[in-house]
Structure formats: structure tokens, C-alpha cells
Image (cartoon, coloured by chain):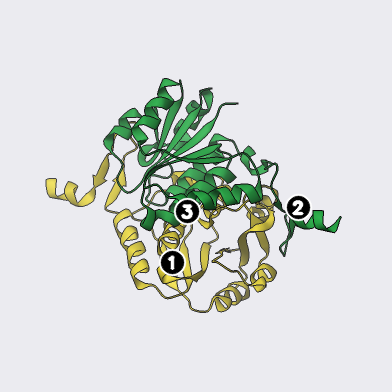
Chain colours: A green, B yellow
Amino acid sequence: MSETSILRLDHRRRRDARITTHVCLTARAFGASEVILSGDEDNKLMENVRDVIERWGGDFEVEYQKNWKKSMEEWKRNGGKIVHLTMYGEQVQEVVKDIKDSPMDKLVVVGGSRVPIQVYREADWNVSVTTQPHSEVSALALFLHMYFEGKELNKEFEGGKLKVVPSAHGKKILDQDKLNDEK
Amino acid sequence: MSETSILRLDHRRRRDARITTHVCLTARAFGASEVILSGDEDNKLMENVRDVIERWGGDFEVEYQKNWKKSMEEWKRNGGKIVHLTMYGEQVQEVVKDIKDSPMDKLVVVGGSRVPIQVYREADWNVSVTTQPHSEVSALALFLHMYFEGKELNKEFEGGKLKVVPSAHGKKILDQDKLNDEK
């Protein structure tokens, strides 16, 4: 299966910490394999995300790349395709089939406050979720859900310490450390 | 058609302004009819959301209700049903059909930092999107998308000044004010 990476443009440490964290966790929960952060280097954010990976499992990765142009160029040179999520793009319901039909690795670019026009030009697909203003977090979730055809909802995250047991009216968590203690 | 409202619990003005704004805009873009904000009263945030509604159209509403218990009780008294989005709930792919089969108005409750156990008890459905930690914004987007069966992607927002014309490699916006000027 091809890889799906997310490139977060123009992260600003003070202003974007929570939104970018939500972008990273959404990428992981919805089946992407890594997030590349651009903009400010933010070690605390990366530690927080790695902490979630350690506790909840899966082989998701987060890394920093100062130069987003380099990331995009490299991706293309390696034969990968680029999907840029933007409210100005073609509607996801119109183009997602084309994107799925391509067997190449995908880099999903999620914008910051101002996205250079170059990103629109370099992207193989500029994709809009609803054509309304909302959130890079919800656009990413929706795009990955349609791209993975809902299979991401059943994804297993191997090797984590914690696991939710779905419950109608409460909270149930399996904690591997506690299970080990009880043995 | 039944109404779909969103109740955002425990908004904290300083810490949550951006995330709660994204919750509101996601609710609007994905076809809900209103957001009820609880926790801190935040007039600036509400103004920002109303500004988006004015510019981009649709009949979405945002209001403040200090006492979330009252909102939930009132909703139930009026015959509406409550869906609480939580990573501990039953998996969305298992329960969304049941929720759609109910013809009653739905109140979708989106948690804050700590959700009282009462919310889990009072909800008709506690619903999890992926059972992994991620974001109330992506959980809301995904839930509404599955609840509205993707029809929300084609929703028309009447009466706005701005409208995106989906575009493969650029930005095209119809601006009603400018169109009127050009006449």
C-alpha cells in the first residue's frame, strides 16, 4: 500500500500549537503514516505527539523540515503525488476517485495562515472540503476518511499501552501497564 | 427535516478561542443549524462566527447558554435526542444508522477539557470516532459527514456575499458586492 504523509505549512509556535497538535493527532487517528512540520521548529509539540504515539500505539511519525519547498520537491522527485487541501480547490467528492486511482504515495499539504501560490501550482490536486471556511483539522479528517473509504475507522494501532473499549455510557480503557502489574 | 444543533461544553476564552471557532465553523460548513456555546461567555468569538455567516451565507446561528445542563434538559423535554462525541463511546460506524433512523432533532455535544460523567449518562448515544485521541473538530466533522451521508458537501449557503468557484490551480471567489459595483 502506498504511503500517506501530511505536510503542515507555516506552523507558528505561539499561535498554532493546539491546532497543529490537532492536525497531527487527526493525521495519526485517520490513518496517515507521518506528519512533516514546517514553519517554526516546535520540540514541545513534537514531544507531545510522540508521547501520544508511545501510549496509544501505531507506527506514526512526526518530523520537522524547515524548508517546505524541499519537502514538496523531494516528494515529487521520488514519484509521489501532492494533494493540497484548500477551500478554493476542486470539490473532494468530485476528485477523490482520481486521487484514489493513483497508486503513488500521497503528500497531503495542509495550509497555514497564508499559503504561497506556488503550493497551488505544484500540487497535483487542490482539493476543497465544502468550499466554505472552516478548519484545516476537519478538512484533513474528511479528506482522509474519503480517501481511505472509511477503513481508517477500524485501523488497529499496535504496540500501545492504552486502548479504549467502546462503551455505551461510560469510560473503559485497557491499560497494558496495569494489566502487567496485575499478573 | 429535523434540526441538528451542536453544544460546545466548557469553552475557556483564553485557551480555547481558536479550537472553539473551528468547532463553530465546522458545524456550519458541515450542515448543522446552530452552535450553543457553554463555559466562558465570549462575545468576540461569537462576533467572528457571525461575521463568517454574514459574508458566506446560510442561516446558521450561534448563541451562548451558561448552563449546559439546562440546554440538555430542555432539549430532551422537547423530544430531542442527544449524541455525545467522545473517544470512549460506541464506534460511529456501528451506531450512526440507529441515530439516522431516529427522526427527532439531534443535539451533538462536543466536550471540553473535562466532561462530567452526567453527560455520558444523559446522552442517548455516546459516539466515538476512531477510539483514538485526536480532536473535537475532526470528530464533529466526521460525525456530521456520516450523519448527513455526504449530502452536506453539496449544501448551498444562501444570501452570502462570497462564494468560492472550485478551481484546479488557483483562487476564484465571487464577491456579490463587487459584482454589484460592476453593474
Specify the amino acid type for callout 1.
Arg
Q: Residue furthest left?
A: B182
Q: Locate residue B152, reporting x and y percent.
A: 48, 48
Q: Position of residue B63 (x, y in %)?
A: 43, 71
Chain of residue at mark 3: A
| Residue at image location 66% in from the left, 45% down from the top | A57
Residue A180 appears in view: yes
Whole-angstrom CA distance, mark 1 to mark 3, is: 17 Å
Is A30 in front, or is A98? A30
Badge 2: how crowded within 10 Å, few (<14), some, or many (20+)? some
Residue A82 at x, y percent in the picture: 42, 30
Tell me the residue that label 2 is attached to: A176
Left or right of A30 in this view: A15: left
The residue labelled by disc 1 is: B15
At label 3, the amino acid type is: Lys
**Mark 3 element type:** helix
Q: Amino acid at mark 2?
A: Gln
Asked whether the residues under marks 1 and 3 belong to the same chain, the reply is no
Instruction: Please tell me which residue lies in front, A109 or B138.
Output: A109
**Which quadrant is home to the N terminus of chain A?**
top right
Chain letter of disc 1 in the image? B
Look at the numbered discs 1 and 2 and tell me whether their residues touch, using CB distance below 8 Å.
no
Mark sitting earlier along the chain (2/3): 3
Query: Residue at the location (53% across, 24% down)?
Result: A101
Q: Is residue B169 above or below residue B26?
A: above
Looking at the image, which residue is at 23% across and 50% down? B176
Residue located beneath label 3 in the image: A44
Circle 3 residues within 10 Å: few <14, some 14–19, many ≥20: few
Q: CA distance from mark 1 to mark 2?
A: 32 Å
